[in-house]
Amino acid sequence: MKSRFKYSLQITLTACLLLLGSCGKKNTVNSNPTGASGTSPFYVGNPALSSNPNIVNQVQAIRAGIACLNGPRLANDVSFFINGGSISGTTIGGNWQPGFMNSGTISNLYVGVSLYRDIMFLTKVTNGSQVIGYNVTLSFCGVPNAYVNYPALVSNDRALINFQAPNGITINTATSCGYGLIAAAMNTIIVSQRSTTNPYTSDFPVYTSFSKPNCQ
């Protein structure tokens, strides 16, 4: 489950910064251009999906059919990729970079959902029989500030950057849902970057755990 309210100390510290009108140190890594522009990589015409166009319909239906619990779904999904990526067996991990790898063919889709209905789309990228990497595309829900009248902690005007999955992403190749499943992606981290239009914000770490969705 998402640790939004579990790490209350972090929220308190962030609120204190807001009250003081100070901002945290800005992360130097650029935000994902795909997510920042609001363009989903899952669109008809993406050459990486030409051999498996059904994935586009699946992603769009899943995203539209899962409602957030505590805030609106963000307009922008954000994507990261990894070269290679296999840790052991069915666990994927490594150094995720901003962007969406479309130089190969997307052959498989895996889906995970958090307690608060954030969605993780993991796609395998292949070149023939060789796995060349993975993409992870995240559809997050907004996170309101615990302090009324203060800026939301996750919102459309704050880029999501620096995705990490320190425990890896474990997949299940069962296709009972019509796609593969993310069995576990525990305690992933992404940074909700300070707003470029609101000086009363600071970078905020978002901890999220994903597991397989209920597709029944």
Image (cartoon, grey):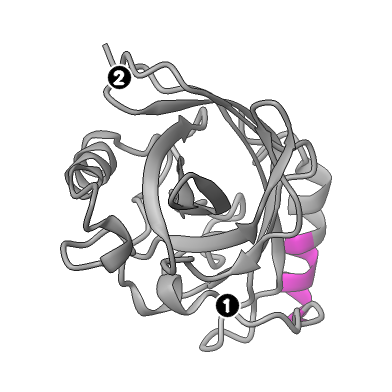
Q: Residue furthest front?
A: 128
Which quadrant of the figure has residue 163?
Answer: bottom right
Residue visible at 77% across and 40% down in the picture: 7
The answer to whether residue 8 is above or below residue 94 is: above
Q: 146 and 91: which one is in front?
A: 91
Quadrant assignment, res 151? bottom right
Q: At x 72% / y 45%, what residue is drawn?
A: 93
Residue 23, placed above or below residue 189: below
Asked whether residue 128 appears in the rendered view, the answer is yes
Which quarter of the figure is the N terminus placed in?
Answer: top right
**Disc on res. 31:** 1
Give residue 177's mark: 2
Q: Is residue 17 magenta?
A: yes
Category of crowding for the residue at label 2, using alpha-carbon neighbours closer than 10 angstroms: few (below 14), some (14–19), many (at least 20): some
| In the displayed structure image, the side of residue 57 where residue 22 appears, left or right | right
Tell whether position 96 is magenta.
no
The residue at the point 75 percent across, 79 percent down is 27
At x 56%, y 62%, the residue is: 80
**Mark 1 residue element:** loop
Q: Which residues are magenta?
A: 14-23
Q: Which residue type does callout 2 highlight? A: Cys
Q: In the rendered structure, which disc, 1 or 2, sits on the residue that comes first in sequence?
A: 1
Crowd around label 1: few <14 · some 14–19 · many ≥20 (10 Å): many
Question: Which quadrant does the C terminus fall into?
Answer: top left
- Compared with 42, 207 (above or below) is above
Given the image, on which type of amino acid does mark 1 rest? Ser
Please, what is the dominant secondary structure of the magenta stretch? helix
Residue 110 lies, in percent from the top left, at 44, 34
